[in-house]
């Protein structure tokens, strides 16, 4: 990635553009991943995809996308802006020159710091996205609960059961945020933030480091810039590696964030891990790994390619 001695704003702008493109590409499979990890009743990835399509049509895959499209662009802008500028700060501190190439240790430090700082923005974004994606599952669960507790034993069809708990139904992102603040307080927006730190600190390390390594391997010589095809391939491989290795902590994070106030199952991260293990076995922590691997490639390849090309455009003006 290009560097400069000074603080660069174009890294943030390029990250914003890259974030928007990656959301459009990755959201359908992100919905499938979330349903597999935090939901019930899906046998496998294909069954989950077919179930969503049959019950909710194509629009079901894009449920909850408006908020990520508006917010992840800002989040991604912060991630790429922080990562690139942190690299320059580290180079300036260690070598006295912000343009000095970063060592693998420098890149690791920049990646970990980026992962840590990103949680403050990313946790509320992820929580709202997951609550919106899980809405159908939550409605079904409430219907089953009400139908199973009729005092007179009447057999009522699920579609005829009304749902009084409107806190569980979100009309959109703003209503979702408002409902969470009312029922869970400000800390409710950061439910699962601890699990997100456990995911993102090593996750971003295994995101940016493989990308840098693959770009170097695919570059014909040290003086030339990576070809767009090399950027696309390196970004896709890095995304798949990062998401697959982050799956266990991503499962815990998704379950913590989908755990609404009125259906609270988990007391904390450790309780979520133990409860999930006891009830579903160790394989539960790898649920959605295949989706993460598939989704990670096009989403990350699009993100890195858009980011790098945007930077070249801005710096060529």
Image: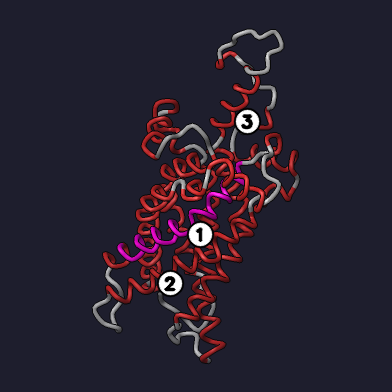
The main secondary structure of the magenta stretch is helix
User: Is residue 305 visible to the viewer in this orientation of the structure?
Assistant: no
Q: Left or right of 9: which side holds 190?
A: right
Q: Are marks 1 and 2 in contact (CB under 8 Å)?
A: no
Q: Nearer the viewer, residue 44 or 250?
A: 44
- Give the percent coordinates (x, y) of residue 282: 51, 49
Residue drawn at x 61%, y 53% is: 123
Instruction: Magenta stretch: give its range.
Output: 233-258
Residue drawn at x 51%, y 91% is: 95
Instruction: Determine which of the numbered discs, if any, sits on residue 76 in the image.
Output: 1
Label 2 sits on a secondary structure element that is helix
Which residue position holds label 3? 169
Q: Residues within 10 Å of mark 3 (few under 14, many from 20)?
A: some
- Give the percent coordinates (x, y) of residue 27: 44, 45
Magenta highlight on residue 148:
no
- Give the percent coordinates (x, y) of residue 263: 68, 35
Which residue position holds label 2? 209
Quadrant occupied by the C terminus: bottom left
Tell me which label, 3 or 1, sits earlier in the chain: 1
Tell me which corner region of the image, top left, top right, bottom left or bottom right, holds residue 167: top right
Question: As displayed, is residue 124 above or below residue 6?
Answer: above
Question: As displayed, is residue 217 above or below residue 305?
Answer: below
Q: CA distance from mark 3 to mark 1?
A: 28 Å
């Amino acid at each position: 990635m290009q560097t400069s001695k000074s603080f660069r704003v174009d890294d943030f702008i390029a990250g914003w553009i890259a974030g928007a493109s990656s959301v459009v590409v990755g959201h359908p499979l992100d919905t499938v991943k979330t349903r597999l990890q935090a939901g019930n009743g899906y046998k496998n990835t294909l069954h989950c995809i077919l179930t969503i399509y049959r019950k909710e049509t194509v629009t079901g895959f894009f449920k909850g996308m408006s908020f990520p499209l508006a917010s992840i662009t800002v989040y991604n802008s912060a991630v790429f802006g922080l990562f690139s500028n942190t690299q320059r700060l580290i180079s300036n501190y260690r070598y006295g020159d912000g343009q000095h190439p970063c060592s693998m240790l420098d890149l690791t430090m920049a990646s970990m710091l980026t992962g840590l700082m990103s949680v403050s923005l990313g946790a509320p974004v992820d929580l709202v996205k997951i609550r919106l994606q899980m809405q159908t599952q939550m409605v079904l669960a409430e219907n089953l609960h009400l139908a199973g507790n009729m005092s007179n034993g009447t057999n009522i069809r699920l579609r005829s059961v009304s749902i009084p708990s409107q806190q569980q139904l979100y009309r959109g992102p703003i209503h979702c945020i408002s409902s969470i603040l009312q029922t869970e307080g400000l800390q409710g927006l950061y439910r699962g933030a601890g699990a997100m730190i456990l995911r993102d600190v090593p996750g971003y390390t295994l995101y940016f480091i493989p990308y840098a390594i693959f770009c170097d391997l695919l570059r014909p010589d040290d003086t030339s810039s990576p070809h767009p095809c090399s950027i696309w391939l390196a970004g896709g491989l890095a995304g798949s590696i990062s998401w697959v290795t982050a799956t266990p902590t991503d499962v815990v994070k998704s379950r913590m964030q989908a755990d609404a106030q009125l259906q609270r199952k988990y007391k904390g991260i450790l309780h979520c891990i133990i409860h999930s293990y006891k009830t579903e076995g160790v394989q539960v922590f790898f649920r959605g790994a295949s989706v993460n691997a598939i989704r990670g490639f096009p989403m990350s390849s699009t993100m890195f390619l858009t980011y790098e090309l945007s930077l070249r455009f801005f710096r060529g003006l």
